[in-house]
Amino acid sequence: MSMETKWWKQRKNPRDLDAQVQEASALLKEKQVVAFPTETVYGLGADATEEEAVQRIFEAKGRPADNPLIVHVADEDQVSQLVSEISPVARKLMDEFWPGPLTIVLKSNGTAAENVTAGLSTLGIRMPDHPLALSLLRKTGKPLAAPSANRSGRPSPTTADHVYQDLDGKIAGILDGGPTGVGVESTVVDCTTEIPIILRPGGVTKEDLEKILPQVMMDPALADEKQKPKSPGMKYTHYAPESPLWLVDGNDDFFSDQLEQLKEDGNRVGVIASDELAEKLNHHPLIRCGSRFQLDQVAEKLYGALREFKKSDVDLILCETFSETGVGAAIMNRLNKAAVKRIQTY
Ligand code: TXA
Ligand code: MG
């Protein structure tokens, strides 16, 4: 089924924005789905209390039904309406990191539509730190279920154009807020356990969490491919670019040698590299993703870079690996999921 997708973009004066948010919100109240910017990536929103609306998200994305959605809220009152209890730890996290890139998993009280949680008794909730997202939430007056606004399996969208590439004709509209800032998705933390568990690394780092929590764990499944992940979304192919992605784990000379070898063998190679590595390579096409010492920049540019290379232009994509400190944990989590192969020096 195809529909006209509105792209709310041009704004001649500030009142245009209000009118556009109003229009998007009216569509959400009619159980339609609308993409909107958050500080992490664009989300594909629908009324989280309406099963029919939520169903449209799964259809538009081609998302497996057993992968639960994150519910976005405008204030803490909306959280109380959705969960059976807010533990002291959860309260602390909200006070410290909301609005912001942290999703808190709590026990659902059944108010959210059943398909939001994909049959789980828990609910992932976050308050996004983006004026457009917050104004859409306030105007709609409902919690909004919103996964990343990409076709399932593709890199998450960090611009409205990315959303348009993936979902034109499949959704009611796209609220354009320019490029998102953080670039990788929110950190998902399970607060239903004695010790909070990071189910997905993201914009709020483990180091950030450790500053305010006595204890926090990484889901062991994040490190071990064989373990069943607790966050259902972590088991699917994800973030995949059009051409196969290979990670190169070694120093810059090693990267350069591998690249030359692949070119000699007749491969058309696209490169994703930090500024530091890019300076040492004489190669095209190459996309820079910022300094390897400024991982915030890398996070911001990562998904755009993965979308840049088209199947018609390159046979494979080579990308360097990054330090796993801070937001590097999220960057490497996504790169490992997107990659089909890893070349190592040892
Ligand atoms: O930054 C973000 O979180 C973005 C923006 C749009 O807010 N959203 C996002 O949603 O990344 P999505 O659907 O692409 O990823 C949601 C992740 C999945 O890995 C899912 O399995 C997990 O959160 N999740 C959601 N509810 C959960 C729950 N109740 N228990 C465990 N994991 C949950
Ligand atoms: Mg996603």
Image (tube, grey):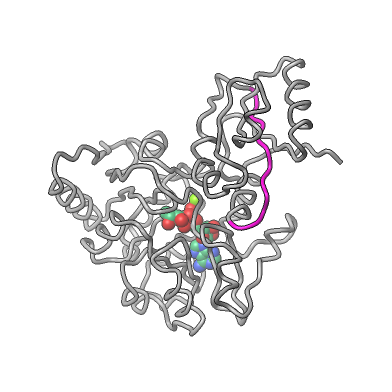
Q: Residue at x 27, y 43 (%)?
A: 173
Instruction: Name the spot of residue 342 as percent of width and height, x first.
Output: 75, 39
The residue at the point 87 percent across, 41 percent down is 346
Quarter of the image for residue 39 reads bottom left
- Foreground residue among 135 and 35: 135
Q: Residue furthest right?
A: 346
Numbered range of the magenta stretch: 315-326
Numbered disc total: 0
> Relative to 70, does residue 257 appear above or below in the rendering?
above
Q: Is residue 156 visible?
A: yes
Q: Residue at x 44, y 45 (%)?
A: 61
271 w.r.t. 62: above or below:
above
Q: Percent position (x, y) of residue 212?
A: 55, 76
Does 289 appear above or below 92?
A: above
Q: Nearer the viewer, residue 243 or 345?
A: 345
Left of 152 or right of it: where is 345?
right
Indicate yes or no whether the magenta region holds residue 59. Answer: no
15 displayed left or right of 122: left
**Is residue 67 in sight in this rendering?**
no
User: Residue at point 61% right, 80% down?
Assistant: 214
Is residue 316 within the magenta segment?
Answer: yes
Q: Is residue 165 left or right of residue 53?
A: right
Task: Indicate the position of residue 56 as horizontal and vertical percent values.
Answer: 36, 51
Q: Quadrant of residue 7?
A: top left
Answer left or right for 262 relative to 179: right
Q: Say which of 128 and 152 sits in front.
A: 128
Position of residue 104 measured from the top left corner of the image (x, y, whole percent) = 48, 70
In terms of image quadrants, where is residue 250? Answer: top right
Q: Quadrant of the N terminus?
A: top left
**277 vs 83: above or below:** above
